[in-house]
Image: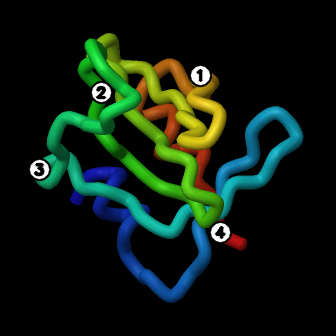
Amino acid sequence: MNLLEKASNNLGLIRIIHHNEQVYKLVCLIRTEDRRPFQADWYQGKESYLVAVDENGHFFLRHSGGYIFKLDPNTKKEERIAKSEHEFIKMIGWD
């Protein structure tokens, strides 16, 4: 079982990420084999894959370069969260 599958187990627990004094409560984690390129009318010309979504609608995406970033759909701002998917998954804790 890989790290993502371990993190996806026990769906009754709330998964959180602490980053830059913020707490993000994840409501969805996407398995590697279920990912597709992220598409939105306002997000063009970039190849990224959805990894997770938090309760406030932020998207956590894996860039084709391997790093994970948070995308705010309201402001369209991107914030780098982790240098790799492995690092991102290790950041996930339980509330």
Drawn side of residue 64 relative to residue 75, left or right: left
The CA distance from mark 3 to mark 4 is 24 Å
Measured as percent of width and height from the top left, residue 40 is found at 31, 38
- The residue tagged 3 is 33
The quarter in which the C terminus is drawn is: bottom right
Residue 14, by quadrant, is: bottom right
Measured as percent of width and height from the top left, residue 46 is found at 30, 16
| CA neighbours of label 2 inside 10 A, class few (<14), some (14 to 19), many (20+) | many
- The residue tagged 4 is 94
| Label 3 close to label 1 by CB (< 8 Å) | no
Measured as percent of width and height from the top left, residue 26 is found at 56, 62
The quarter in which the N terminus is drawn is: bottom left
- The residue tagged 1 is 80
Q: Residue at the bottom extreme?
A: 12
Most foreground residue, 59 or 74: 74
The mark lying in front, picked from 3 and 4, is 3
In primary-sequence order, the first of circles 3 and 1 is 3
Label annotation for residue 48? 2
Which structural element holds mark 3? helix
Residue type, mark 1 in image: Arg
